[in-house]
Amino acid sequence: MTHVIVQVSDTHLSPTHAYFDDNWQTFVNEMQALRPDLVINTGDFAFNGPAVEDDIRYSYREAERLGLSYLTIPGNHDVGEPGDNPRLKQPVNNARLNTWKGYFGNDRFVKDIEDWRLIGINSELLGSGLDAEHQQWEFLEDALAGSDGRTLGLFSHKPLYQKTPGEGVSKWGILPEPRARLLGLLTAHKVRFVASGHLHRYRYTSVRGLDLIWCPTTAFITPSVKNDGCIRRVGYLKWTFDGHDVRHEFIEPDGFINHDMTWRTKKFGTTISLPPNPLPAAE
């Protein structure tokens, strides 16, 4: 039987900073017409979840409004991020994790769909040193080992790396030490693909049998003239699973707006320091 799953990422929703709400509303309408078997959000659901619980609350309400089965894993704009850099402004911690779990229930998942096992992890735990990180490693090892012959796919907010598996510390990928451990597990269990978000662009590459797919954002693009194999457009991914086979499509719906926030962030510093842009008042 064929199963259709939609991956959406980096939606950056907020009732007070609703810069990208227009694309999300278009996405909701599209999903209600498409009726996929499952929607997976690979993080940065919220605009500034680490600091503003109402952004997480609003994201949860919008997920429920889809009226579809869905799974979510958090990103750095939801729960903060790992690292020992003292300049890190929003480190992941137990309080932020508990806020997320209070709405979405968990920050990882296992979903078996006939011949496939899909696993979602919280990339923001990797390298954090929190007890939750150790628990997630145990969860991941058990999920991989117990797949019972199913083909494996992994969903994560951050990609394994941006350019090379051996690159150093970067805000664009998983930290080097946990990355190496994760790659070892993925290779040992012959995982077919890693699908991630975070970079606000689409790219599909394959390294030694492991497909690496970057999901685009529904929020804002980061324009560039680099010839790096990326599509820097807003959109989402439509996955089709059929037996042990899988394919995906980049979808940019009619009505999506490619918001370019670079001039705003140059003026205001970072995305989360942008001034309020509230939702219109209900009629």
Image (spheres, helix red, strand yellow):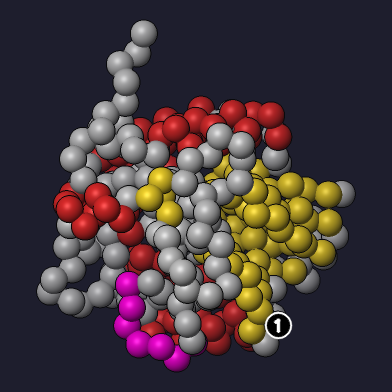
Q: Is residue 257 magenta?
A: no
**Position in image of residue 106 (x %, y %):** 44, 50
Q: Residue 226 vs residue 150: left or right?
A: left
- Name the side, left or right, on which 19 lies relative to 256: left
* Quarter where residue 22 is shown: top left
Q: Depth check: 30 or 36 in front?
A: 30
Looking at the image, can residue 177 be seen? no
Given the image, on which type of amino acid does mark 1 rest? Answer: Gly
Count of numbered labels shown in the rendering: 1
Q: Residue at 25% of width from left, 75% of height from top?
A: 83
- Residue at screen point 18% across, 40% down: 275
Q: Which residue is outermost to the left?
A: 86
Residue in front for this viewpoint, 73 or 17: 17
Disc 1 target residue: 209
Q: Nearer the viewer, residue 153 or 144?
A: 153
Majority secondary structure of magenta residues: loop
Looking at the image, which residue is at 49% across and 30% down? Answer: 25
As drawn, 167 above or below 65: below
